[in-house]
């Protein structure tokens, strides 16, 4: 084949391609013409439908490249939006975790602060203003003793009450049902073969902080140790030379403190059934005793007019003066403050670091007697809700009085009265602060100076309902 022939062939191929391209051009022209016709028809339809089509019309003029570019940007925007949403969720989760950590840290810090204040004897939770005065019908009366109630204790779990009386019996009560769970009967003196018990007036009781041991003391100089759950007798401690008038367990231990009309304070180890030591200092019969977790106890010195703080390891004592009469009852509010009552009608608030009362409220329960010969009602019992500002006092003026201690225990304000007829010989708050228990009798626990015939020898459970308010604060 010659070069000219070879050159013609490509020319022919090109002409064929051009000829083939002409029909395709004609088809595209026809298609474009059809499109224009459709657009015209569509324009008429759009006029009849709505203006929404106007938003679509600009997009129809875009090229494929522009549409692809717009599609790519939309995917990126979606990814960006999801990423921002994910980051926002992570930020919210971190904020919630930080808030939870801060809340836990505040709780821990609050508990640590309370522990420090409690150890220093400065913890004072504000609860008194929340307490509502109970209706008389809400007070439950438990009757079982034949003679005046002299003392009572509540188990640490607030499920049971032990009461003792001048009839020499001890009764264990159920708080929920008010039924007797167990009775430790009176025994006859110098009679063999009978179960252990008391044969003279029981003046004091104490229960260990774990609820394992119950101790009771009587006028025959004996201290009897019982298993609190079963009321089985375990030991008998002897050594006092006169009536046992006060008992208290050191909180968190089985160390027992006792005091007596023989003017002494004795220390016992109940778990080991052993005597430890004796401390002397009071000038008259000691009337009451209390203790908390520190290795010390406080006593009310009766007619010697003193309150004493006994430091057991150092075998030393601090002497406090303030009342003018016989100091018959005492109770620790926290590790650094206490409240006491006397037969001159006064109630005193003390700091263990000051030898004079912070507050002395005279004639706390009013006056009795003929005009011109009035005498104050004796304060026969005091109680305090541990580490709070709530205090209760009892006498025989037909009521129990509730008080609020001011900030720093610098004042004592009366809240309200709870009507109860008889001698209020013992008062105890429950650990939760939900109720107050009063031991009521026709006679004073230490003697028979008066007799209120209309009174009932009973245990009274007084509910302490709280009004809705801000959470209790501590100072």
Image (cartoon, rainbow, N blue to C red):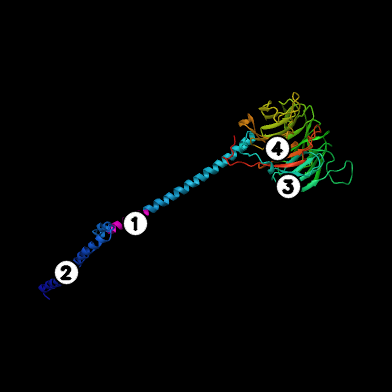
Residue denoted by label 1: 75
Label 2 packing within 10 angstroms: few (<14), some (14-19), many (20+): few
Label 3 packing within 10 angstroms: few (<14), some (14-19), many (20+): some
The image shows residue 395, relative to residue 228, as above or below, that is: above
Label 1 packing within 10 angstroms: few (<14), some (14-19), many (20+): few
The kind of secondary structure element at disc 4 is strand
Residue denoted by label 4: 419
The kind of secondary structure element at disc 1 is helix
Mark 3 or 2, which is nearer the eye?
3
The kind of secondary structure element at disc 2 is helix
Res. 458 visible in picture: yes
The image shows residue 79, relative to residue 271, as above or below, that is: below
Structural distance between the alpha carbons of marks 3 and 2: 109 Å
Between disc 3 and disc 4, whose residue precedes?
3
Residue denoted by label 3: 178
Residue denoted by label 2: 26
Res. 250 visible in picture: no
Camera-side residue of 356 and 291 = 356
Residue bounds of the magenta highlight: 67-79
Query: Residue 132 vs residue 83: left or right?
Result: right
Between disc 3 and disc 2, whose residue precedes?
2
Query: Residue 467 vs residue 174: left or right?
Result: left
């Amino acid at each position: 084949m010659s070069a000219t022939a070879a050159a013609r062939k490509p020319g022919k191929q090109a002409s064929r391609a051009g000829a083939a391209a002409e029909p395709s051009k004609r088809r595209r022209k026809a298609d474009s013409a059809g499109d224009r016709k459709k657009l015209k028809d569509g324009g008429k339809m759009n006029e009849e439908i709505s203006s929404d089509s106007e938003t679509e019309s600009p997009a129809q003029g875009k090229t494929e490249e522009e549409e692809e570019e717009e599609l790519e940007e939309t995917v990126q925007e979606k990814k960006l939006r999801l990423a921002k949403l994910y980051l926002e969720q992570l930020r919210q989760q971190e904020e919630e975790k930080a808030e939870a950590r801060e809340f836990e840290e505040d709780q821990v810090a609050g508990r640590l602060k309370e522990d420090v204040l409690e150890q220093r004897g400065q913890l004072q939770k504000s609860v008194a203003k929340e307490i509502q005065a109970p209706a008389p019908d809400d007070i439950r009366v438990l009757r079982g003793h034949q003679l005046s109630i002299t003392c009572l204790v509540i188990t640490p779990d607030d499920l049971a009450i032990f009461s003792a009386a001048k009839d020499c019996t001890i009764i264990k009560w159920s708080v929920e049902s008010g039924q007797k769970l167990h009775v430790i009967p009176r025994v006859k003196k110098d009679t063999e073969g009978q179960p252990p018990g008391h044969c003279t007036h029981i003046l004091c009781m104490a229960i260990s902080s774990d609820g394992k041991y119950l101790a009771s003391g009587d006028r025959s100089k004996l201290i009897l140790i019982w298993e609190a759950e079963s009321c089985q007798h375990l030991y008998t401690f002897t050594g006092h030379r006169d009536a046992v008038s006060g008992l208290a367990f050191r909180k968190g231990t089985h160390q027992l403190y006792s005091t007596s009309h023989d003017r002494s304070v004795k220390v016992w180890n109940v778990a080991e059934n052993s005597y430890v030591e004796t401390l002397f200092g009071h000038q008259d019969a000691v009337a009451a005793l209390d203790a908390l977790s520190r290795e010390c106890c406080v006593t009310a010195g009766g007619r010697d007019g003193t309150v004493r703080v006994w430091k057991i390891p150092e075998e030393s004592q601090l002497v406090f003066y303030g009342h003018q009469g016989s100091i018959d009852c005492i109770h620790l509010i926290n590790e650094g403050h206490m409240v006491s009552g006397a037969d001159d009608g006064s109630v005193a608030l003390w700091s263990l670091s000051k030898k004079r009362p912070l507050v002395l409220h005279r004639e706390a329960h009013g006056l009795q007697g003929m005009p011109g010969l009035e005498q104050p009602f004796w304060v026969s019992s005091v109680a305090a809700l541990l580490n709070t500002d709530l205090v209760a006092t009892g006498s025989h003026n037909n009521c129990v009085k509730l008080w609020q201690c001011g900030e720093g225990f610098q004042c004592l304000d009366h809240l309200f009265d709870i009507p109860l007829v008889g001698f209020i010989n013992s008062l105890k708050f429950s650990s939760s602060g939900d109720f107050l228990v009063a031991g009521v009798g026709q006679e004073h626990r230490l003697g028979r100076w008066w007799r209120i015939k209309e009174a009932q020898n009973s245990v009274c459970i007084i509910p302490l309902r709280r009004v809705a308010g801000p959470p209790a604060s501590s100072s």
